[in-house]
Image (cartoon, helix red, strand yellow):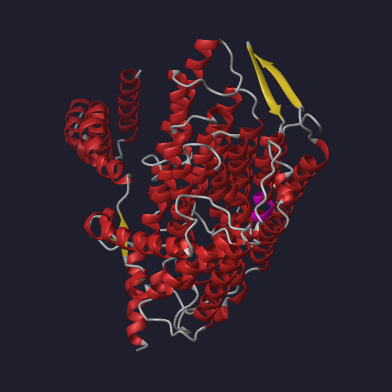
Amino acid sequence: MRHRLHWSTPFVVTVLGAIVISTVADVILIVTGRQEHYIWGDELVDYWPLFGAFWYVVIIVSSKWLGHILLQRHEDFYEGGSLSADAQATEHSHEEEHAHG
Amino acid sequence: MASTPPALILLATAALVAVLPRRLRAWSMLVGTLAVLAQLLLVLEDGDSLTWTWLSFNLTLLRVDALSMVFAWAFTLILLIGTFFSWHAPVRGQQIAALTYAATALGVVFAGDLLTLVIYWEIQALASYYLIVTGGMARSQQAGHRYLYVHLVGGALLLTGVLWHYGDLGSLEFGLFSSGSPAGWLVLGAFAINAAIPPLHAWLPDGYPESSVTGTVFLSALTTKSAVYVLLRGFAGWELLVPVGVAMALYGLVYAVLENDMRRLLSYHIISQVGFMVAGVGIGTHDAINGAASHAFAHVIYKGLLMMGVSAVIHTTGRRKMSDLGGIVHRMRWVFVLYMVGGLSISAFPLFSGFTSKSMIIYAAEHEPGFGWVAYLLYVASVGTFLHTGLKLPYGTWLGRRRDDIPIGRVPVGMYIGMGIAAVICIVVGVYPAILYNALPFETHYEPYTPAHVVHALELLAFTALGFWLLLPVLHPDRTISLDSDWFYRKAGPLLRAFVQKPLEAPFTAAQRLMRIIAERVSGAFLHPTTTWTPVLRLSAYARARTPEAAVAWLARPPLGVAIGAAFVVFAVVVLLAR
């Protein structure tokens, strides 16, 4: 998952298409007066896209930060230092990856 | 059959499975499950009941109403789905445990009194424990034991609360608890453990990923949703549950970002989704109760589907972490497609079940004065749900750079059938929600498919997906575990052993050691009787023989008689002392 997705992949094309379609539909709703208000601030144009993007970033950044400073430990933390079966399997798979280049 | 509790049908099936040969066991499970489905569809009606007087208690073994029927349908359908999913591996113990587990879940939802509830509750803990402890994973045993300890505490709380309640009111009827009663708080504590309300939740992500790939399907569906049912039955309108539910919905998201293990990630999302239901219980209006019940139904099915999707991957690759997977979609195309049906359902994508169920809880919060903040934060939780279950997990497991070096076995046909049934239900409930809405406890006028709702949901999800694309490099799973509240009792274990268990055991350990020493000495003395007893025998022989030659000849014979006699005497002494 470390690599970037090129914009031309089916996933990204689908996402960009959905954004365009839903934004156009949102404008139509506003023009035709068929908007519905659910929560604070959602009468603003493009509220929901901004809501999704903003909270997405907040969830990722805050979780990573919490994990880094407090929560995350090595996989064999509870086994007291000896490599667990899973960790061994993981290491083994790493070795296989290296062996295959 | 009208007044036969469905739990008894499944328990009888479990007994049958215990004696049937391997080739008939899965068929037996299927027949038992279909019998219960037929009973739900054709026989049981609102108002049916079965009472039984035991000692001086009037027990209600069966109480049928709309709320219990919604949950009963969900539990029986997941049993049907799980039966197909586990068809390839008819392991007797797992099948009996799964049937017993489902039977107790049905027993809970049809129990009309608290004593019946306690009995089913405790058996449910044992059956689910068995599914974990025999899971065959590296940590199944330890995780299973921790699971059992936590649930035994919950069971003790429940029993104490029920007895207190009976002492206060002289009634065992299972209805709404009055706020402020100590009995109510004790029972709520027990229900909170099974609903995985933080910080009492760690048994869930600790235990479920260690079960077998087939056992996970039942585990993900039954315990927490049984708890949601009893919360709806006993604590609807307790406003304390509103912030608790919202906190649950958000809590699971943080851990899901950090998780690498597929089933642990989904386990944290169970907590998050159950949070929606708990918030609905706390709001307590008709719409909120309808929303919690319908979301519980949808969640049982789509979470089962998600668990089946990743379990199929674990079954065929032997790998459970996203860091060891990816790039295999071209070899598991249908598993991926079926998983995504569950992923879109849990993300509340239009035309899938979550869109019609989850939104009803948010709708209830929006329309209840003072709960606008609840709706706001549940929308935030929805963003996180799509991010993890609909994007991160499928991307990390199936997509990404193509890999042909991962060995992949064949996916059994039964797994496809199980996942297929679940996917069909997700879509049917999403496309035609009236089929679920008509079964809810209260009449509903909620309409999920308004143009604004559909457009806003698409915008929310599309921009979340855009964020996923942009921040993809940050989202790689680390090869770590995340500390959770189980840290306290896992770290406290050695201290408890040192300061509580060992002092208690000390006298018994000392007595055992003493007995071993005595036994070693006695057995050593008779191991080589000719050398051990020679001095005694020598004296005896010389005393009895008339000549030295006769004494030597007598000693040359094996002194078996003396040895057996002496052994008998010592044995008699030991027996007398032991008495």
The reply to whether the magenta stretch includes residue B557 is no
At horizontal 52% and vertical 48% (from top left) the residue drawn is B131
Query: For the N terminus of chain B, which image quadrant?
Result: top right
Residue lying furthest bottom in this view?
Answer: A101
Q: Quadrant of residue B525?
A: top left
- Taking depth in this image into account, of B3 and B346 the one nearest to the observer is B346
- Taking depth in this image into account, of B487 and B379 the one nearest to the observer is B379
Percent of width and height locating residue B533: 21, 34
**In this figure, what is the number of numbered marks?**
0
Percent of width and height locating residue B267: 46, 53
- Taking depth in this image into account, of B301 and B311 the one nearest to the observer is B301
At horizontal 58% and vertical 36% (from top left) the residue drawn is B229
Query: For the C terminus of chain B, which image quadrant?
Result: top left
Res. A73 in view: no
Residue B295 position (above or below residue B155) = below
At horizontal 16% and vertical 33% (from top left) the residue drawn is B535
- Taking depth in this image into account, of A73 and B182 the one nearest to the observer is B182
At horizontal 60% and vertical 65% (from top left) the residue drawn is A31
Res. B53 in view: yes
Q: Main secondary structure of the magenta part?
A: helix
State the extent of the magenta-drawn residues as a range.
Answer: B78-82
Percent of width and height locating residue B101: 59, 42
Residue B339 position (above or below residue B231) = below
Percent of width and height locating residue B207: 43, 49
Q: Quadrant of residue B186?
A: top left
